[in-house]
Amino acid sequence: MTRILSIVASVFLASPAAAAICGEDTSSDIPMFETAKTAFKSGDYRTFTRIVGNFFPDLKDNYDGYFGKLDELFPEGYDRCTTILQRREDPGFYQDMVLFFPKGYDAPMAVLLIGAKIDGEVRMIEFNYNTNISGVLDELK
């Protein structure tokens, strides 16, 4: 319950000063991305799906297709994470690539978050994850 409350609080309290969970704070951190990283790192994939929003209409109905295997393999989340790439392009295209290290494993899970400013608000428009970093690198725009 405490984990859920902390994730929910971070969703609603996210601000431009939100702390970066997967590295040092930078002025280009996007609060929604940082909140999504927090949920993913905790293994709270359902909260992650709520954060990424309505741009993915089948996400809620096909949760198991997206995250069922992660729930099974990494239910406790990840020991640590590091943001290895932040791309910001004007007027409003954003990408973060993050490595999440599962508890008990040396090999990371690569996650790519892609957002865009739509109607003045940053929204997640794409995400991808893979234990093979090449699979995620291929998605860089």
Image (cartoon, rainbow, N blue to C red):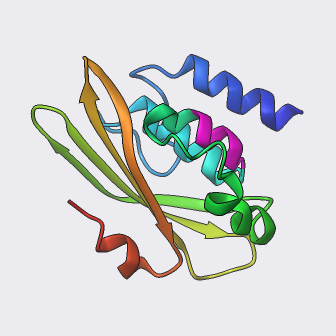
Which quadrant of the figure has residue 97? Answer: bottom left
Task: State the residue at coordinates (35%, 52%).
Answer: 96
Out of 3 and 71, give the one closest to the viewer.
71
Task: State the residue at coordinates (86%, 32%).
Answer: 2
Asked whether residue 110 appears in the rendered view, the answer is no
Where in the figure is residue 16, as x and y percent of width and height? Answer: 39, 22
**Does 48 appear in magenta?**
yes
Q: Which residues are magenta?
A: 44-50
Task: State the residue at coordinates (25%, 17%).
Answer: 120
Asked whether residue 63 appears in the rendered view, the answer is yes
Vertical comparison of 15 with 128: above or below: above
Q: Residue furthest left?
A: 90
The rendered magenta stretch, by its main secondary structure, is classed as helix
Where in the figure is residue 26, as x and y percent of width and height? Answer: 32, 38
Q: In which quadrant will I find the C terminus?
A: bottom left
**Does 35 appear in magenta?**
no
Q: Is residue 121 left or right of residue 104?
A: left
Task: State the residue at coordinates (45%, 19%).
Answer: 15
